[in-house]
Each structure stands twice: as C-alpha cells, then as structure tokens.
Image (spheres, rainbow, N blue to C red):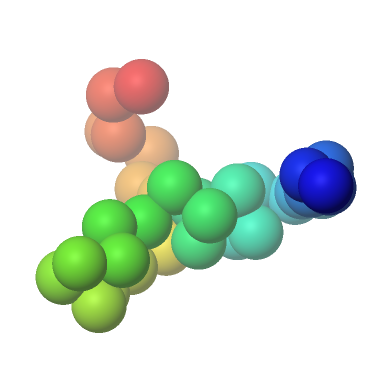
Amino acid sequence: MAKRVVAVGTTRVRVLESDWAKNETNIFIYPNLLF
C-alpha cells in the first residue's frame, strides 16, 4: 500500500527533490535561483 508524503518548508522539499544517485543535495536557495 502506497503512503503519501507531505513536505512542509522549502528545505524539506529540496531534500526530497535531490538526486539520490549522486548522494548530494544542494539545499541552499539563493536570490538569483531560477525555478
């Protein structure tokens, strides 16, 4: 059975979006970052 994950906050969302294969996460969001 699949469970839902709810992320609250930009840091948590960035961690969930990270590339697990590279084993690194760029969690810093700078003012000039383009989404």
Q: Is residue 31 above or below residue 13?
A: above
Which residue lies at the image location 38% right of the left edge and 39% below the top edge? 31
The answer to whether residue 4 is left or right of residue 34 is: right
Q: Quadrant of the C terminus?
A: top left
Q: Position of residue 11 (x, y in %)?
A: 60, 59
Q: Position of residue 13 (x, y in %)?
A: 60, 48
Q: Is residue 4 above or below residue 20?
A: above
Image quadrant assignment for residue 18: bottom left
Question: Does any portion of residue 5 appear in the rendered image?
Answer: yes
Q: How many marks?
A: 0
Q: For this rendering, which residue is in front, 3 or 11?
A: 3
Q: Position of residue 15 (x, y in %)?
A: 50, 61
Q: For this rendering, which residue is in front, 2 or 30?
A: 2
Question: Does any portion of residue 26 appear in the rendered image?
Answer: no
- Residue positioned most to the top: 35
Which residue lies at the image location 42% right of the left edge and 63% below the top edge? 27
The answer to whether residue 33 is left or right of residue 9 is: left
